[in-house]
Amino acid sequence: MTQQIVTASRLADGRVLFRAPEGWSTDIHDALVFTPEEAAAAVTRAQGEPTRVVGAYAVDVDDAGLPLLGRERIRVFGPTVAPYAAQLEA
Amino acid sequence: MYQYDTFDHQLLADRVAEFSDQVDRRLTGALTEDQFRPLRLMNGLYLEMHAYMLRVAIPYGVLSSRQLRGLAAVARTWDKGYGHFTTRQNIQFNWPRLTDVPAILQALADVEMHAIQTSGACIRNVTIDPFAGVAGDEIADPRPWAEIIRQWSTLHPEFTFLPRKFKIAISGAIEDRAAVRFHDIGLRVIRNDAGDLGFRVWVGGGLGRTPRVARELRPFLPAAQILGYLEAALRVYNLHGRRDNKYKARIKILVDEIGIDAYRDQVEAEWHAAGGPALVVPEAEIARVADFFAVPDYVTLPDATVELARWRGADSGFDAWMGTNILTHRAPGYAAVTVSLKPVGGIPGDITADQMDAMADLADRYSLGELRATKEQNLVLPNVRQDQLHALWSALRSLGLETANKGRVTDIISCPGQDYCSLANARSIPMAQEISRRFADRRRLDTLGPITLNVSGCINACGHHHVGNIGLLGVDKRGAEAYQLVLGGDAGEADSSIAQITGRAMTAEEAVDAVEVTAAVYLDRRQDAETFIQTFRRIGVTPFKEAIDAAR
């Protein structure tokens, strides 16, 4: 059965967000797992928060709640290349 | 270099105020995202995979040390301590917050920089030869013309909503280092039989999903007539370019569809109707702008032949760097230096804020305070005394910026790819890094000689794969990243060619192996001192295809 999470970009800084039980989270481990129907409804609801999030969409995930597609995994975990790792999260 | 006047300063001040207000209105909900998106794009602000991305214009790639320090401050204060030089002589910041962008634009304005027209369907930053004004093979300096075109095209009301983006390149030297035949309009500085300065005008070149080598629009246009003629060329495009399909909206498609002769007839008619040859940039204005690019006061020096030979003999690292990263300068005793941003295993074009500050200091100490950004994603110090080259190299070495690989197979052009870009189908940077490691050995680089290797993460071709001697294109193969190898591209005007596909897409590992096979075929088949591209042109793509297939 297809499982999905809902993701978007935070308006103020563009950071990746996930629909969580309490609003939105930057941590995928907080993400709610939906059926496709529930996810579609959550995407629609996100359009009601235009000053908070941009570009909400649903992503297929595996049983661990992680995206199936490589592109979406990169979006979750950040660039796979970290040139100046020490500075990256400074 | 060009210094802003009161008009330039006022224009930026107005723009910063306007965009600050637009950001405020977006944050409070007075503007919807659909309304705000085109406004932020007009200010170079994209929303990418992980964050916003701000693309800052470096007008025709010319940068002062003060401006580079300004960019370092942006990277340090509002980003994650680094920036990324692009394949069009600009710089991108990958992590700005929307709420900080007004402050960033103000900081940029303070050093006479901005992000206007780095996105959107308008005339983009003009690209030129990064060795403009200093190259030994130069016919005339393209910088004054690039500046005149910059002023004309900035916020030009007629060309703010073109069918699609529009890119202009100018080359002023014998060797085309600006890829003039792969731009919407390419201008080649020439002199006619009477010795008058002018441009050979190319139109309809480009990369992307429909790569085209530009066709000749005019064999000679007197230089002073450039703006009237460009205006006519853009007007015909603006009128007839397609707006129904973004993939068919570039001028190359219009030229394809109506033919170069019909397009030329319309441009000439439009130009003559508006005044034709009588429409000239006033002589006094050309002289005023050219003054900003006057030849600096070079010290009269002999070539430092003896010292250089001694240093090269004593230090193999310096010798290798001198062999690849130095271009002959117009002034005796000077050299133009390429500072490679392609260390082994590094990210092409990436530079830390500390390195930017250090490069600014080196520009002040060794290069009259000026730098250039190149479409190959390197930096140039254009005015270095030959007797200071060893000192400069030693300083670069302490910064990790002494890589001796300009024009070699590890001087890889790479777009950000799927690590950053929303459009990408595959990652580019890890591919560039792996090839860089495989070919890192000095003897190997020298044995292979001049080769361009370009990587794009999607068909939009920001990594210029179509014009790489070796090109890699990232594609999506049923949800997995894969790479197509193309061979035989050349960006130069004289031998412009689009690379040919070698076969079906491969995994990343197979693709790197295929690059190895390609190099081996070249070494096996080359005659005398043939370069890679010369061998390719002689034997064609088939021997490479066969060897790649056999190895799989």
Image: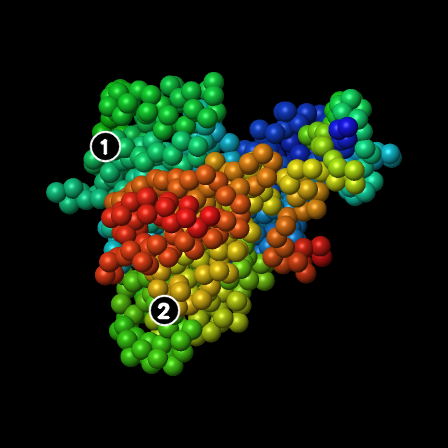
The chain identifier of the residue carrying mark 2 reads B
| Label 2: few (<14), some (14–19) or many (≥20) C-alpha neighbours in 10 Å | some
Going from the N terminus, do you reach mark 2 or mark 1 first? 1
User: Hey, what amino acid is under mark 2?
Assistant: Met
Residue placed at 71% from the left, 32% from the top?
A59
Q: In this view, does B227 lie above or below B147?
A: above
Residue extending farthest to the front is B550
Of B311 and A31, the residue lying toward us: A31
Residue placed at 25% from the left, 33% from the top?
B216
Q: Position of residue B110 (x, y in %)?
A: 56, 49
Residue placed at 75% from the left, 40% from the top?
A66
| Left or right position of B420 against B443 | right
- Tag nearer the camera, 2 or 1: 2
Residue A76 seen:
yes
Q: Is residue B443 above or below residue A50?
A: below
Q: Mark 1 points at which residue?
A: B218
Of B390 and B65, the residue lying toward us: B390
Q: Is residue B192 above or below residue B344?
A: above
Under tag 1, what secondary structure? strand
Residue A56 seen:
no
The chain identifier of the residue carrying mark 1 reads B
Q: Name the residue under label 2.
A: B322
| Left or right position of B535 against A50 | left
